[in-house]
């Protein structure tokens, strides 16, 4: 398991690793040393970053794109993170490969060393385990999944998205050039498209969602499989009594803090929107958040602030969830059959918000229009219509049908095949070399 030590990235890996271990496989992690204690408590062997600069381990480029910067500057931030870290990854993983001789890799979708090089240079099957609620691989039905626009339903919209995608590819032209420079060092041929396109050529690509949420796409490579959210069984514990002691006769709204840094604008807007209203509002602050920094000034008796309460324990008491649109939060709400109002800001949030709208499981409220009055009106609209709740419940059933961590483990076992272990001679010859590699 090769994964960045970012909470939203690692959360799906641990349940899958548990299932694989319970089925008799040996599982180890390559990640930042800040995750080592948690993973070792789980009983997994950990290979911490060594040659990989620890500044990459502490860097989440998602925080950078919240600043006011242009497209080229954002591309530079992402390129440094995704490709600047690859040489260190490869040095670490070559050493791990020689010592531990893995039969396959389950890879973070943003850790590109295994995808760009190891799959071919070490002849290791690579399974990409995504953390987004939709598949980012483009196709004819959705030519630019990374562009925050609704599903193109007409020829004109598809042409517009292709034009936008072409423009972004021109801005990001340095990314495939740098990727190909790295591949040439290992004797590998140049990519014919983008790195994102290339991820669709891995043996396995797992998406923690359902086709019903991702526009029912039929244009994806055969390696792509939807598996639903990967959560552990112990994460489905009942809600604590204190969150259930809300006025049962009033709608219950849960606003979730997903902000980076000290910005929790959504919670402040929600507090102003519903203070003194006819709903019970719970403001859920992210774990470790200093509530004093939120400046909520909550005095209304119908507004409650919870800190360090796991989302899964607060959801059963909610009728509507208000969130920025992180994949993990949206999938958790829908898994509980709770509709949403999504106020997207960055990363995958705009794309997730459009899918919430398209699936009828909630309302998208653009961040630039998110005043207290408009947020209250959107929430009241969801509360007033059972249509959103029914759709959310149907989506929860669709997500559950995908099988979660157990289904993911099954696909990984299928990728590895019945004879996963290579012979000692073959394993000994699987070293990574700049000058002599075997490709296929």
Image (cartoon, grey):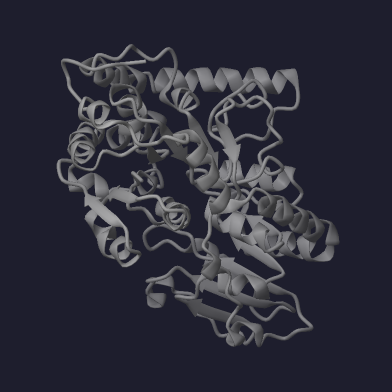
* x and y, in percent, of residue 20 in the image: 45, 52
144 relative position to 425: left or right: right
Residue nearer the viewer, 314 or 324: 314
319 relative position to 269: left or right: right
* x and y, in percent, of residue 359 in the image: 74, 45
Question: What is the total number of numbered labels drawn onto the structure image?
Answer: 0
* x and y, in percent, of residue 216 in the image: 71, 35
Q: Quadrant of the C terminus?
A: top left
Residue 418 appears in the figure: yes
Q: Residue at x 40, y 57 (%)?
A: 7
Q: Is residue 387 above or below residue 303?
A: above
* x and y, in percent, of residue 133 in the image: 57, 45
Q: Is residue 15 above or below residue 187?
A: below
The image quarter containing residue 233 is bottom right
Q: Is residue 246 above or below residue 33?
A: below
Q: Residue at x 26, y 38 (%)?
A: 101
95 relative position to 117: left or right: left
Residue nearer the viewer, 200 or 68: 200
Residue 325 appears in the figure: no
Q: Residue at x 50, y 65 (%)?
A: 257
Q: Is residue 337 above or below residue 284?
A: above
Q: Residue at x 42, y 34 (%)?
A: 419
């Amino acid at each position: 398991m090769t994964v960045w030590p970012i909470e939203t990235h690692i959360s799906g890996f641990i349940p899958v690793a548990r299932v694989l271990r319970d089925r008799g496989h040996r599982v180890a992690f390559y990640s930042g040393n800040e995750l080592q204690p948690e993973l070792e408590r789980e009983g997994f062997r950990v290979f911490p970053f060594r040659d990989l600069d620890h500044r990459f381990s502490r860097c989440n480029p998602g925080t950078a794109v919240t600043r006011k910067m242009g497209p080229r500057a954002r591309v530079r931030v992402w390129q440094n993170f995704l490709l600047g870290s690859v040489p260190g990854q490869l040095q670490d993983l070559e050493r791990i490969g020689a010592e531990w001789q893995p039969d396959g890799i389950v890879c973070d979708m943003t850790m590109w060393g295994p995808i760009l090089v190891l799959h071919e240079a070490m002849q290791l099957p690579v399974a990409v385990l995504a953390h987004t609620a939709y598949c980012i691989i483009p196709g004819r039905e959705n030519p630019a999944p990374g562009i925050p626009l609704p599903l193109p339903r007409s020829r004109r919209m598809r042409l517009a998205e292709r034009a936008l995608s072409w423009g972004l590819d021109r801005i990001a032209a340095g990314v495939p050039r740098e990727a190909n420079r790295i591949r040439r060092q290992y004797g590998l041929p140049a990519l014919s498209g983008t790195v994102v396109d290339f991820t669709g050529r891995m043996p396995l690509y797992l998406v923690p969602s359902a086709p019903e949420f991702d526009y029912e796409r039929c244009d994806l490579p055969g390696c792509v499989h939807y598996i639903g959210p990967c959560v552990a069984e112990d994460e489905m514990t009942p809600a604590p009594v204190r969150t259930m002691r809300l006025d049962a006769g009033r709608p219950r709204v849960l606003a979730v803090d997903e902000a980076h840094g000290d910005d929790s604008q959504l919670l402040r807007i929600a507090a102003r929107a519903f203070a003194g209203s006819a709903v019970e509002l719970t403001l859920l602050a992210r774990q470790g958040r200093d509530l004093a920094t939120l400046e909520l000034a909550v005095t209304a008796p119908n507004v409650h602030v919870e800190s360090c309460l796991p989302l899964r324990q607060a959801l059963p008491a909610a009728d509507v969830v208000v969130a920025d649109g992180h994949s993990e939060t949206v999938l958790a709400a829908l898994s509980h059959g709770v509709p949403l109002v999504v106020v997207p800001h960055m990363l995958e949030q705009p794309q997730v918000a459009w899918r919430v709208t398209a699936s009828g499981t909630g309302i998208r409220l653009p961040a630039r229009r998110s005043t207290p009055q408009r947020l209250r009106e959107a929430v009241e609209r969801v509360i007033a219509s059972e249509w959103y709740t029914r759709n959310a419940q149907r989506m929860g059933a669709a997500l559950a049908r995908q099988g979660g961590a157990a289904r993911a483990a099954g696909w990984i076992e299928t990728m590895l095949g019945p004879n996963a272990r290579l012979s000692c001679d073959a394993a000994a010859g699987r070293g990574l070399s700049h000058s002599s590699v075997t490709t296929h």
